[in-house]
Structures are given as structure tokens and as C-alpha cells.
Amino acid sequence: MSGNGTGIGASVKRKEDARFLTGRGRYTDDINLPGQLYGYILRSGMAHAKIGAVHTDAARAAPGVHAVFTGKDMEGVGGIPTGWLIHSKDGSPMVEPGHPALAIDKVRYVGDCVAIVVAETAEQARSAANLIDVEREELQAVASIEAAEADGAPLVFDEAPGNVCYDWEVGDRAATDAAFDAADHVVSIDVVNNRLIPNAIEPRAAIANYDPATGDYTLYTTSQNPHLVRLLLGAFVLGLPEHKLRIVAPDVGGGFGSKIPHYAEEAILTWTAGQLGRPVKWTCERLDAFKSDTHGRDHISTAKLALDADGHFLGLHVTTKANLGAYLSTFATCVPTYLYGILFAGPYTTPAVYCEVKSFFTNTVPVDALRGAGRPEATYLLERLVDKAAVELGMDRVEIRRKNFIREFPYQTPVALQYDHGDYDATLDLALKAADWAGFEGRRAEAAARGKRRGIGISTFIEACGIAPSAVVGSLGARAGLYESGSVRVHPTGSVSVFTGTHSHGQGHETTFAQIVSDMLGVDFDAVDVVHGDSAKIPFGMGTYGSRSLAVGGTAIYLAVEKVIEKGKKIAAHLLEASAEDIEFENGSFTVAGTDRSKTLGEVALTAYVPHNYPEGLEPGLEETAFYDPLNFTFPAGTHIAEVEVDPETGEVELVAVTGADDVGRIINPMIVDGQLHGGLAHGIGQALLEECVYQDDGQLETGSYMNYTMPRAADLPSFNINHNTTLCTHNPLGAKGVGEVGSIGVPPAVINAVIDALRPLGVNDMSMPATSQRVWQAIQRANG
Amino acid sequence: MNDFTYHAPTSLDDALAALRGAEGGTLIAGGQSLLPIMKLNLAAPTDVVSLAGVAGLDGISDDGDSVTVGAMCTHAQVAGSATVQGRIPALAAMADGIGDAQVRNAGTIGGSLAHNDPAADYPAACVALGATIVTDRREIASDDYFQGMFMTALEDDEIITAVRFPVPARAAYAKFANPASKYAVAGVMVADGPAGVRVAVTGASGDGVFRMAAMEDALRGSFSAEAVAGIGVSSDGMLSDTAAGAEYRAHLVAVMAKRAVEACG
């Protein structure tokens, strides 16, 4: 790893940006196929209703309309599957109701798919959809966890009594109870993790085609994981074999988890294209995106921490209720369980941890992964609770954390995970210094002189990324492996194509992976292109989420490059009349050790494809594939510090400083890493201060547009103070950990802890997310009595 | 969006003729409110008559004791006008705080006033400054013009041509914006001008812009932040939404009024 101008460690400008910044990106909606028709999805305006007859005659007769299909038409087609089976405490499997792509007897949320209208133009399809008459009998909706668990609550599914999907636990309850029995102090907290709407800048879109000549289906779709969509859509919904179904996820404008799931629209479009024998295109409108893209978070939790007299953590008990929405989206069930409960050791040595999670069906949009997926919820709860413990015990907020840090690795937590390595003191010290924590009281006083209440908050956290290994997640209920694939094809003249099963929708893989390969092979950065997103081109892979692409996908590529080098050594040894064991490879040249006799990679590649003078028994060609199944999760860690100023008259919170000290493992491209950190921080700050999905009691989405759903804007954010202290992951050859979710995991509790710190002198000791001006003002009013 | 007939007249007479000749016609100025509701099919006019090419609706002039703003002036033009900045800086600052840059570069003062969104900023400026709404056929005092949410004194076929603002001795606008939409949750214009001391509030009431008589009385006695600081605002009739309930809104009106007085200097 030479670390040259374009190699590992260099802030190379992103290859993909030239096309994005000049408007030449090719997104799903940019794709048009000859003879295509346009589909419009009619969605339910009621949150919960029985469906009777659906009258489509008027719509079918409308100008330009080719077809209208309803749930009855698709009744024989498979339902939308879910990807993770959770078992309850008593060993019983979760309740797993069917999810018809088009609603059949019932609609279960505002936005549920009711019918598709296919017409010559998108406008004709949409206008005709207004003519569809759905006979409905409205039912009482359950639009929140509280409503779902109320006595006698209406049932979203008859087969799910109490609207419960599962009642899960992790950790040793008896040991945790014993820890509380022995505790000197017990600190309790109630927190809500606010529901969020992901809002990728590119709405979902799809265009499906069926070729009657070959029987092949092609679906272009906005997905983070085309092979996963192919597997679910082909095997579970439409009954199509893989070789007859091609999924292409071209340029995708942001996913944040909301483009992981296999969506009903993908099944409807593909099935419809098959029925009509013509391509059908659908592009989600923004208002429909609010009520049909999977939402994130939405937990209600209560937790308690047991401590000894010195402030050592003895035990943690967490009880959480999670909202899964109206149907089980692809990874909905694992987000509040195996991506949540196992995080509760955090960076601390708490010897006994127990977490129980009850998940509910409600008449709301299905909830699935959203940037961080379970880990932000866990981190928020833990870091709020630790802060509260410090206050109640009269301890310093930094010292209580430091006192409980894990320092010996590997560390087996009481909730399944084993941390391979980390240095939590280093990131804490770095952040404290960078944020001038010691000088804060002076800034507080200066702000007070201006009539502002200034506060500072901290969060020390770990993540678990690159979810793995397959055998372990399989034993926990995953219905897929979580390895990744990479292929490296050295062309005859020495340029390189890299094929990855991960998918880039903002992460910059085309650049980062090219840096790794060009560095390892000693070829020009510009001579390496990365291919992703097309199931007809790339090997089977699991896609991009959970900060896995570099640690898992990058490692697969790394291993494929190693195979290429090993084969190249055999070819070079033959050409140089030496033994392969004596060949060294460096800077693009195969050299006989201790001599100046060498062959370039280009010479070796050409020989591989024109094997006139070639080792006996060796296959021609220079192309290798590796599948990498990670040995463990990776554990990025860090400290985030936020500083706020509150206007006590209006309740407005101004975020004046954010400092991060992060350990994300090996950094391939520092510019891209900082960009990921910035984006994640903006996302986390959005959750802490601005974003809140609100449903009315009848299941209508109150925050259904940008008129009242507040996305973070540049003006809402300070200039971020980002610092790095890198330790390497011990179990992948790159030493990579992951960075995409850091900000959204680490910063929300730091921001809220800062708001509470600012308001504590006014008697405010609690604050919910988002800390909107109204919420802050109301808290101040309550404290004033 | 439904199909409609688009008209691009170049004179007021032609615009009026097109509007009167349409079954369900509407005028379009900057389109910042009309186009979104048309896209949602909440409005489906048969005819859309653009004022963009109509002569005589642009320009900003200094008339000595007043400033006249053409109806088709964009918010950005008002905000950037040396005349407005020099004579009524509070009006320029208010215009500079409307929506976002795209809205300010397309939206117009005439369009905003004709629409009379209860959370728009201009109504507070007009009422506080005692502006006169000039139309193709008459002049309407602000006090008579605003008649409740989305309701004005305009006749169906009446076109605003200009707005005349008397130059005040002092004035300032303080707005608490909705964090998502940036519309006013509580916007208060305080002015001390030819129309007397006025405190006009937008964004807060379901009835649109209103005046705070108690504050005006107090300011006539002593034009100071202290004079209005203790005056409570009732939450009766206040709007209530996700960002601000009625009680919080009423509180914000009081705070914004105080801050506007402070900003008057």
C-alpha cells in the first residue's frame, strides 16, 4: 500500500462526480425503453379499511389507458417477503402476515398500494386513477405504539393478537436483576426515538420490461442491493428463476436504508410488464414518497442503569416497544432486535445487560432500516442514560464515561458481540481537546451575557458495522448470507474492470475501490473502473447498507486482487524462467527476488490472454473472483461533542459547534470519509433538532410534505470539526471498519445532552427529540411552574 | 395538472379581456402559490392569464413621501432595491426573508397580496405601513383590503398594478419562521409613520393579518420595547399546527413584537 497520489489514503476527487455534477448521471427515471407505458399507483387514502369491489371501468375507458390491475388481478402472485425471522422469548416464531403487493381485502396504511393504472403518458395514468371507485368500509386505525397496545385495540392483522409481532430478548435477565439488587444507585430514563422519513433526493422509480422472444424480465429500480431484489422478487413473489430476471440499479440518488427493501411497486411493475408485453415505467412523486418509502426509528423505551458507589456500571435493563408499521418490510424485524439490543454494552464494561423488545404492527408506513438502523436508537438511549446518571450521582459527565470504558480487547460483551479492538480514551481525549471542553464555562458565561443559554453535550459510542458472519446471522434468523463478492478483470492490455456486489448511491465506491485496486496492482487510477448495480454483470452480492461496503465488499475485492497477483506470479515466473516462489510483486512489476529481471503487469496480462509462451496446466486469462464472509462485525467508535445556544424567550436551539473524534478504521479516501461523516452528522442533527414524522390518530400522515417535515438545511448546521484517531480492524486485511452511519449514530445524544445542559439551570432535566423551539419553550414553561 | 389555455397578454386591457373571456380563468404572477396547488389538482383553471408580459406592472419609484412598488416586482427586487433599502429598510429586509432564494426570485408582491396567504409576510407590512393597494380601477386602503384567510377586497376580474407604501419614521419586521416551510409562524411589523403607530401581525391568526391595538396604544405612550413587553397576547383564534400550537404562537407574537420595536431603534 504505497499511499501515492491516487492510492490508499489519498483524497482523490471522485470519478463519479464529473457525470453527476454535469447532469449526466443516469438514474432510473432517465431510462426510457421503446414502447414504454407509464404506471400510476393508486394508494389508499385511508389508514385502515376493508375493501369491497374496486370499480375500474371508467378508468379503463379513460384516454390513453391500456390496463388497470387491482389486488384481485394479482391474487395468485406471491406476497412481499421479509428477510429475517425473529423468535420471541418463549421460542415461538414472530407473527408473519402476508403482504400482497396490491391490497386485496384490506388496506392497512395511508399509501398502501390499491391499483395500478397503465397508460400512454404518466398524466393520463394519474388522471384515470382518479376515476377508480373503491368500495371501502373504514375501520378504526392504530397509528401509534400506544394505540396498538391499548386494550381492545383494533387489529391490523387478525393473526397478530395485541398487534404484537414478537416479544424478543437478549442478555441474561437473572444476572441483570442480581446486578440491580447489589447496586448502590439506580438511574432510570424514559425515551422516545422519534420516527423519521428518509427523504432520499431521488424518489423511488422503476421501469420493468418483458421480452416475449426470450422470456427474460428486466427491472431497472432504485435499489441499494439489486441481487437481493432479484432473489426476493424472483424466488418469492413472481416465481421467476434468476437467469430470467435481471435487476439493474443504475445511478441512485441516495438510499439511507430506504432503498434496501424489496418494495411492492417493483413486483407490481414487473408483473404488469409481463401481462402487457410492454415496458412499464413508474416514478414516485414526492408526496407519495412521504407515505410509501419505508420510515425509520419509532421506539418507546424505558431503561435503568445500576451503579456502584463509585459510579461503575453494574447492570443495564432496557425495555423497548418498536413500531414496525403495517407490513414487515425486508429487514424491519431485525432492526429493533439484532441491530439494537446487542449494542447496549456500548463502549462500557457493564457486566450484565438485558434488553427486551416488543414490536407492534400499526396502520402506518412500514418501518425499516434508516442510516444506523437500530444503532442510533441504542446509542441515544444509552448516552442519555449515562448523562443522567452523572447528574444524579453528582459526577463529571466525562469521568463517568472514562471510568467505565473497555480497555482490554478482545472484549466479550454480555449481549453477544465481541469487540476486536478499539481505543476509546484516544477518541475521547482528542474530542475534548478539539472542542475545548475545558474552556466551555467561559463560553457559557459569555452567552449568558447575551441572554442565551449555552450548553455542551457529549456522546461516546461504538457501532457494529459490516454485519456478519453469515453462519452467525443465519442462526439468529437472517434468511440471507451477509458476505460480499468482488471480481477483478485485468484486460489484455492491463486496464482493469472491478465488479462488486455492493452498490454505490452516494458513497463513492467507483473512486474508493479504484484506489484500492490501482494501489495494489500498481496501475493508473484512471485505468481502473468499478462496475456495480447490474445483476447481469456483477457476481452475486448483498449490496450496500450497514456501513459494510468497504469492510466486506472492499475486502472481497482485496482478496480477488491477491488472487490475480498470485496467478500473475506464476505467469511471470514462466516468462522469467524462475520459480513462482521467487517472484515479488511491487508497483506493478513482477520481479525475480534479488535481481533486476522483471515483467510488468501489462506484459503478464497480455501473456495471459495470448498464451503462446505459457505455463503448462495454467488456465489462460487474468480474472479472479473472491467471496468474503466476514469473521466478525467491525466496531467503529468515537466521541461526539455538541454545543448549543438556546434562546429562552422563543425556545430556539442554535447548534453552534459539533466536534467529532472518530475511529473508522483504515481510511482509503479522507475526503470521502469526511463527506460521509458530514452527511451522517447532518442526518443525526436532523433527528435531534428538526425531523419528526407525525401521524394523526386516524392514521393520516400529518407531516406529509416539506411544508411541515423539516429536513436539515446547510444553514441549520455549523462547520463540523472532524478529527480522526485510527485503529485498524483486526480481522479484515484492509483494517476497515465503516463510516457511513457514524454521524447519525453518535451525534443525536450529544445534541440533546447539550440542550439539557443548557436548560438545566432553568430547571429542565429532560428533552425529547426533536428539540424544536416549541418543545423547548414548553419545557421551560413547565419548569417555571 | 389538468390541461388549460395559457394567455400571454401584453396590456392590462388584454389581460382583463382574457380573464373575462374564460370560463374558469385565473391570473398568474410569480406562480409560487398557484403552481403547487395546480400540480396537486387543488386548482384546475381552464385558463391561465400571465401578467409577466403586461406593460406597466414593474418598477419601483420614490415618490417623496411614499414608495411605489410595481405589482410584478419580485421579492428579490424589493429586497435589492436601493430605493426601498434607503426609504423603508424594514420593507426591504422583510422581502429578503420571504421563503428561499428561488421563491424570492419568482414570487411577486402583487401575487402574494392577491393570494393573501395567512402566513405570508406582505400583509403585515402593508397594514403596519398603511399601504395602498392600487388596481386597474381603484385604490384600496390596506385596512379594507385584507378580509380573512385567502380573502381580499379584489373583484373577480380585478388586477393589482402597484402598492404604494408611505415612508415611515421608523419601522421593523420580526418574524419567527416555520422551520420547514419558512412561512411566518408569527411575523410582526411595527411602524411609526403617517398612519400612526401600528403593530400588524401575520402568520398567527386563522383570519389573516391583524393589528394589536393594546400594543399600539402602549407604543403611542412610549415607543419602547419595555412598553410592549408586558402585554400578553391571547391564544384565542390563533392557528395551531405541528410547528406551533396556539399558545406558543401567541407567545411568539408578543416576543416578535418586542423584537420589532427594539429593531426600530
Image (cartoon, coloured by chain):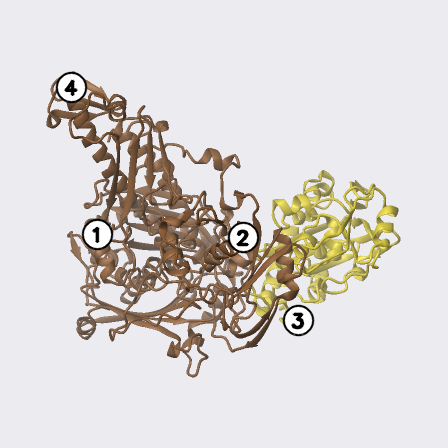
Element under disc 3: loop
Q: Secondary structure at mark 4?
A: helix
The kind of residue on which mark 2 rests is: Trp
Colour assigned to chain B in the rendering is yellow
Q: Is residue A267 left or right of residue A413?
A: right
Image colour assigned to chain A: brown
The image position of residue B21, as x and y in percent, is 86, 54
Q: Earlier in the sequence, mark 4 or mark 2?
A: 2
**CB of mark 1 within 8 Å of CB of mark 2?**
no
Of the numbered discs 1 and 2, the one sitting upstream in the chain is 2
Alpha carbon separation for disc pair 1 and 2: 40 Å
Q: Chain of mark 4?
A: A
The location of residue A449, given as percent across then percent down, is 47, 53
Residue B237 bears which disc, if any? 3
Instruction: Give neighbour class at mark 1: few <14, some 14-19, many 20+ (Cα, 10 Å).
Output: many
- The residue identified by callout 4 is A576
Which image quadrant is residue A384 in?
A: bottom left
Name the N-terminal-most of marks 1 and 4: 4
Labels 4, 3: one chain: no
Counting from the top left corner in percent of width and height, residue A646 is at 47, 57
Nearest the eye: A348 or A667: A667
| Mark 1, residue position | A632
Chain identifier of the residue bearing label 3 in the image: B
**Relative depth, front residue between A238 and B239:** A238
Mark 2 vs mark 3: tell me if same chain: no
How far separated are the C-alphas under marks 4 and 3? 91 Å
Viewer-nearest of labels 2 and 3? Answer: 2
What residue sits 20% from the left and 63% below the top? A350
Q: Secondary structure at mark 1?
A: loop
| Badge number at residue A282 | 2
